Image (cartoon, rainbow, N blue to C red):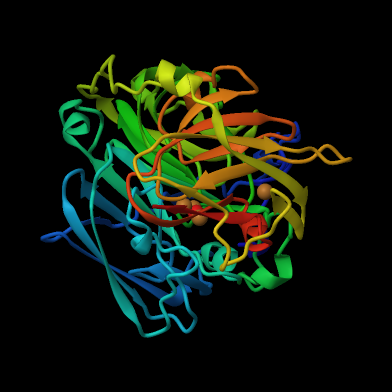
């Protein structure tokens, strides 16, 4: 077979700025689409509160018959799904078996600053460290990845990323689809650019405004398809790309139900035709496959016609789990809506000239302080430049925040829920109600990983 054509064209016509697809349909010509069953990361539950997570390097057969040099957690590529429970005391036993320093950052986890795994908390090759904390947040799909200064983007690009699921009493009693790998799937989207030898050469493809690629990997699988039953299936979508945005739709135009934002369940299932995720963002959706059959041509697409993930329907209609009408009790209070702005952040720039409030990241500078447990309104303004500017996915560590407003208006329904990242478009002003439940130093930054590397990051100390 012609290796050089495998996996290409998936991303044809996608525009990194806004996730727009052009209307060229390269995919019809690619008969490799859907050739491989979607990979499923191992599910790791804590044993007496212990979870072992080791960063390692190895090789992975992404392309048939070719070994690609990759990084992974507890394996050669990507990481497991770690499932933890609210109220549980857990210890992440982190180890670095790679030949370069790294850190272990828990994106979206409300964890004390000393365990957050930001750029200060480097684990040298051969070293290990225990990170202990009590899970104190509601059910959510979170993730973890490295954060060392100067190597975050490259280490993520080569494969360091995994999921964290938090479950709580509410999520257990709701009876949502939760059979791992049966009707509940983690799905991470990462576009990559391979060399002719099918290797990652990050330095060669690095783009200072966000590294994109023409080859899409989902859960590390090239040209995946997902086999599902005739039932409600839950997809936990993670945009794990360094820079690319995705707007997810079904090719049939059918709607699906959104049940969660970055950091928790939404109040009621949102019926959606599409959902956009910028880098770092998650959404859980439920697709009702009971109305399709084995002959159905159904796929998750990006915008109009770029096929991302085709589905294969198998078996008979089963007792599909009904989605409950009420899922959560998220609310932005009147008090929060009326709080004055106490922190202002201006995002500006492109490429290597990216700034927050005119400054670039300095490990030794604390940009803000905030009191533990106190809610403050952060106002984020994305200042356009002469060329218009670009969307910056803004992320804060150690907290789940609420979006109070976007340009003075209530956020769209898909963003009404706990968030830790938000795509701020050029010219937009967003107000966030931010509360930290733990102390320590936390990063906030643009989640285009190359912007983060270029200094579009600051630090808040919670006292
Ligand atoms: Cu995904 Cu600094 O984080
Ligand atoms: Cu984070
Ligand atoms: Cu940015």
Q: Is residue 248 above or below residue 146?
A: above
Marker count (numbered) = 0
Q: Is residue 274 above or below residue 31?
A: above
Relative side of 191 to 64, left or right: right
Relative side of 15 to 30, left or right: right
Residue sitting at 36 percent across and 22 percent down?
A: 288
Residue sitting at 27 percent across and 40 percent down?
A: 182
Relative side of 109 to 365, left or right: left
Quadrant of the drawing holding the N terminus: bottom right
Residue sitting at 62 percent across and 37 percent down?
A: 380
- Measuring from the top left, give residue 236's x and y in whole percent: 39, 39
Q: Choose between 351 and 199: the one closer to the eye.
A: 351
Displayed quadrant of residue 215: bottom right
- Asked whether the viewer can see residue 276, the reply is no
Q: Is residue 363 above or below residue 38?
A: below
- Measuring from the top left, give residue 308's x and y in whole percent: 55, 40
- Asked whether the viewer can see residue 26, the reply is yes
């Amino acid at each position: 077979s012609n290796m050089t054509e495998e996996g290409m064209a998936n991303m044809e016509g996608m525009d990194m700025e806004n996730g727009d697809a052009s209307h060229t349909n390269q995919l019809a010509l690619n008969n490799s689409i859907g050739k491989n069953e979607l990979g499923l990361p191992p599910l790791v539950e804590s044993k007496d509160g212990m979870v072992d997570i080791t960063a390692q390097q190895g090789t992975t057969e992404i392309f048939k018959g070719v070994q690609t040099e990759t990084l992974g957690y507890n394996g050669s590529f990507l990481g497991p799904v770690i499932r933890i429970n609210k109220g549980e005391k857990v210890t992440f036993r982190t180890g670095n078996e790679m030949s370069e320093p790294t850190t272990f950052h828990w994106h979206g986890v409300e964890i004390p600053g000393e365990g957050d795994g930001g750029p200060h908390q480097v684990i040298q090759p051969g070293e290990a460290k225990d990170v202990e904390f009590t899970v104190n947040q509601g059910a959510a799909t979170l993730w973890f990845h490295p954060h060392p200064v100067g190597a975050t983007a490259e280490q993520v690009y080569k494969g360091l990323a995994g999921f964290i699921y938090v479950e709580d009493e509410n999520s257990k009693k709701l009876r949502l689809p939760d059979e791992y790998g049966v009707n509940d799937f983690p799905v991470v989207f990462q576009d990559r650019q391979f060399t002719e030898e099918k290797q990652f050469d990050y330095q060669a493809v690095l783009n200072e405004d966000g590294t994109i690629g023409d080859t899409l990997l989902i859960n590390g699988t090239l040209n995946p398809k997902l086999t599902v039953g005739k039932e409600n299936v839950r997809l936990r979508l993670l945009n794990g790309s360094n820079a690319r945005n995705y707007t997810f739709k079904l090719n049939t135009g059918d709607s699906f139900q959104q049940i969660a934002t970055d950091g928790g369940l939404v109040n009621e299932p949102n019926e959606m035709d599409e959902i956009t995720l910028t880098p770092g963002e998650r959404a859980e959706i439920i697709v009702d496959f009971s109305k399709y059959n084995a002959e159905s041509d159904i796929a998750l697409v990006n915008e109009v016609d770029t096929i991302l993930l085709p589905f294969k329907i198998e078996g008979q209609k089963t007792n599909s789990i009904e989605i409950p009408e009420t899922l959560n009790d998220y609310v932005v209070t009147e008090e929060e809506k009326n709080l004055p702005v106490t922190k202002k952040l201006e995002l500006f720039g492109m490429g290597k000239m990216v700034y927050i409030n005119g400054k670039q990241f300095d490990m030794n500078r604390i940009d803000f302080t905030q009191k533990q447990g106190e809610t403050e309104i952060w106002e984020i303004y994305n200042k356009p430049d002469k060329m218009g500017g670009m969307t910056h996915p803004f992320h804060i560590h150690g907290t789940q925040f609420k979006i109070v407003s976007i340009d003075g208006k209530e956020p769209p329904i898909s963003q009404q829920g706990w968030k830790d990242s938000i795509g701020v478009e050029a010219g937009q002003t967003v107000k966030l109600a931010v509360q930290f439940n733990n102390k320590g130093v936390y990063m906030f930054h643009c989640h285009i990983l190359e912007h983060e590397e270029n200094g579009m990051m600051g630090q808040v100390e919670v006292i």
